[in-house]
Image (cartoon, rainbow, N blue to C red):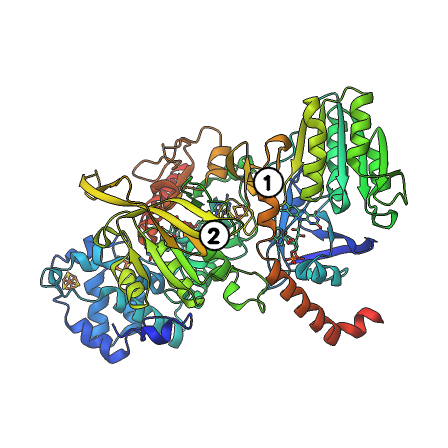
Amino acid sequence: MYRIKEKKELADGIYECWIEAPHISRHARAGQFLVLRIDDSGERIPLTISGVDGDDVRVIYMAVGKTTHYLASLGEGDLIRDVAGPLGTPATIRDYGTCVVIGGGVGIACTPIIAKELREAGNRVIGIIGARNAGLLICEDEMRDVCDELFVCTDDGSSGYHGFPAGLLKRELEALSIDAVWIIGPAIMMKITSEVTRPYGVKTFVSLNPIMVDGTGMCGSCRVTVGGETKFACVDGPEFDAHQVDFDELMRRQRIYLDQEKEALALYQNHECRCMGDRKHA
Amino acid sequence: MRDRSPDLRIHDFQEVDPGLNGQEAIAEAMLCLQCKKPLCVDGCPVGIDIPGFIAQVAEGNFLAAYEIIRSENMLPAICGRVCPQEVQCEGACVLANKGSPVAIGALERFVADRAREETDPKPPALAEQTGKRVAVVGSGPAGVTAAAELVRRGHSVTIFESLHEAGGVLIYGIPEFRLPKEVVRAEIEGVKDLGVTVHLNHLAGRSITPEELLGHDAVFLAMGAGLPHFMGIDGENLNGVYSANEFLTRVNLMHADRFPESDTPVMQGRRVAVVGGGNVAMDAARVARRLGAEAALIYRRREEDMPARKAETEHAKEEGVRFITCANPVKIYGEQSVTGIECLRMDLQGTDESGRPVPRPVEGSNFVVDADLCIIAIGQSPNPLLARMIPGLRLGKRGTVLVDDDGRTSIPHVFAGGDISTGAATVITAMGSAKVAAVAIDRMLMEQG
Ligand SMILES: Cc1cc2nc3c(=O)[nH]c(=O)nc-3n(C[C@H](O)[C@H](O)[C@H](O)COP(=O)(O)OP(=O)(O)OC[C@H]3O[C@@H](n4cnc5c(N)ncnc54)[C@H](O)[C@@H]3O)c2cc1C
Ligand SMILES: Cc1cc2nc3c(=O)[nH]c(=O)nc-3n(C[C@H](O)[C@H](O)[C@H](O)COP(=O)(O)OP(=O)(O)OC[C@H]3O[C@@H](n4cnc5c(N)ncnc54)[C@H](O)[C@@H]3O)c2cc1C
Ligand code: SF4
Ligand code: SF4
Ligand code: FES
């Protein structure tokens, strides 16, 4: 059992949770993730390790389906049945020169830890974070602390630049010489944004989020096509060369269980209203 | 022996074979000739005193029989169920040439089940503490056996297991209807009761670094052969194509058969095609049947060449699994999800080094098997992650960890056994190699003083 040390809502439907898991915190590096299972009938879901403090690790997640909603209903002192990690190959951090680190939506959660390690490795780091609207922006202060420069954008213009991260990225690419770019967010955002760097020939990394089970290379659920070859994202990645990734396949495979996911969420919410309504709305 | 009827059993995950009762066990035990030179024992990789335990069963001394088995085998309820007895103990029994060997596996299972259900078997005596620390990676049959042998000899043993439950393939791979998880849990609890520490959710190489691992007085690597092979053909990443590992893990470990009570889903096929002819393929096809699908098996050679245990191919056929033999997939069709599998007929010629015929594709013989789910069960290789991270650890061509006759690797205090060193094999060979390595580890630790 692993204890939740701290939990809070960062934005509408986006939560931060610190979990006591010394076996993970001891060796976690930027770009790695953990797999958790809340209780005995729970699903194993992967979440990026977005921070480390002593024995504790942080995850930041958006409540999208049954498991993430359930996780969002837990609070300080509650226990999580299983947490495994750190998993995946760490981000390829070295001294590139000038780097841009881009986060979109809940993907912003993964960026401070990468920006920080890049900075420590000697890079000049430009951050770009974007969300649908100002209310969904997360980790802005944290990114400001670890980046040399930070740009914010929103789809509706409610904060910062009015538009997508891709627009800001293009502006930077034209103004400066950029050596490497990280893009983390929803698959469609990673696909579109990485097209911006392609003509410039700038090394671009993305962190892929296919459906996983074990997260240790044993099942192949997470297979993705990169440079025409099948890779297991949980061990060969999740970070890959953006320009080699078959994003359409990734997006297709993310939808495998759409019907079951809807069913599970509806059942959970129905159940939650009946049993936990008091607790939630009190 | 008295299997539940196929019509009944394809609707649930309860055990196919309910096992012997006391009277049947005694009657079966009386058939044993109590040979002076028991050939059956040579056929058992862990060398159980088979006539010894059978003599006790014949007398009705079931607990005494259990003690005899347990001195050589900590997991008898498991082995009695899943060992390929026809090529091991029972295959070697003198009565086998007459066509009816003693049912050693069924007797072993009976004795172990009886001990678990009706008595409180006392744990075997432990030696004095030596103060030596041994790390075991993996909690499959190899890891658990080595841990039990070493803790009995007084060493302090920690198992690191990446999954949330101990047991390896016994838990995530072999389905409930062949090996109830309650049986696996009970036998592993028995090992934990000896004083073995198990750290779940620990992926060695990540949660614990190779250096930390090598800091132990001895290390036993038992990561198994869990890396699923794919065929490398068109359409293999379509939705609806599973490795057998994924399909079986979703159902056995994550209980997707009980979705949505259990949170993990699995795609429900109507027509499932399984590629392969081993135990893994049979298990996948039989699980698919139980989830309500029609199931067909596509295999390159003939039925008699299938590497699965004989009982499993028989059971699969009884349960209505269709065998498409001498055929090999070349392409999987579908837009988003699988709609069919194109195969080529195979012509069998000559024999390979394993004595099996060599399949060759017949040009122009293409045909399509309709399917909405395709499960690939063509083999697994050793788990590469940790082995590649240990500097100086010599690996074989297929990614196996190379060991000598004692299970010692190229690093003096690091040993390995089970599927990680042999490639995908059997529960009992994994246990056999673990016992050999445990003896060598003990000798090394005691020589160091
Ligand atoms: C390496 C990796 C890191 C991730 N990091 C984060 C993170 O830091 N924050 C965050 O909010 N989300 C992250 N995700 C996505 C997160 O795992 C899913 O949102 C979560 O599994 C959804 O579970 P659910 O039951 O709430 O929703 P569901 O209703 O089950 O699913 C919603 C969507 O999430 C995806 N999903 C479902 N099950 C899984 C699964 N077992 N594995 C992966 N994706 C799944 C599917 O595309 C699905 O359509 C990460 C995914 C990966 C692979
Ligand atoms: C579906 C299926 C059916 C089978 N049926 C039979 C049968 O009927 N009879 C039979 O005799 N054999 C059968 N086998 C084969 C048999 O199960 C294996 O040969 C046996 O389990 C091998 O034991 P092992 O201990 O070497 O490895 P495994 O059982 O594979 O266990 C290895 C363990 O190590 C863990 N691990 C791996 N890497 C790490 C790491 N880096 N850190 C921590 N933990 C790690 C894994 O999670 C796993 O739990 C079957 C196999 C499968 C897949
Ligand atoms: S352990 Fe397996 S091979 Fe040995 S006697 Fe028992 S069933 Fe036979
Ligand atoms: S070989 Fe057969 S008959 Fe002889 S002791 Fe073994 S089980 Fe009994
Ligand atoms: S999640 Fe199972 S292999 Fe990657």
Say which amino acid is labelled 2: Val
- Label 1 neighbourhood size at 10 Å, few (<14), some (14-19), many (20+)? many
In the image, B333: left or right of A119? Answer: left
- Label 2 neighbourhood size at 10 Å, few (<14), some (14-19), many (20+)? many
Residue depicted at 34% across the width and 47% down the height: B343
Q: Position of residue B118 (x, y in %)?
A: 38, 77
Q: Which residue is mark 2?
A: B338
Q: Position of residue B99 (x, y in %)?
A: 12, 63
**Which quadrant is home to the C terminus of chain A?**
bottom right
Which label sits on residue A88?
A: 1
Asked if B217 appears above or below B125 in the picture, the reply is: above
Q: Position of residue B30 (x, y in %)?
A: 16, 73
Circle count:
2
**Do marks 2 and 1 share a chain?**
no
**Which quadrant holds residue A157?**
top right
For label 1, being within 8 Å of ligand 1 is answered yes
Q: Position of residue B325 (x, y in %)?
A: 27, 52
Residue depicted at 80% across the width and 69% down the height: A280
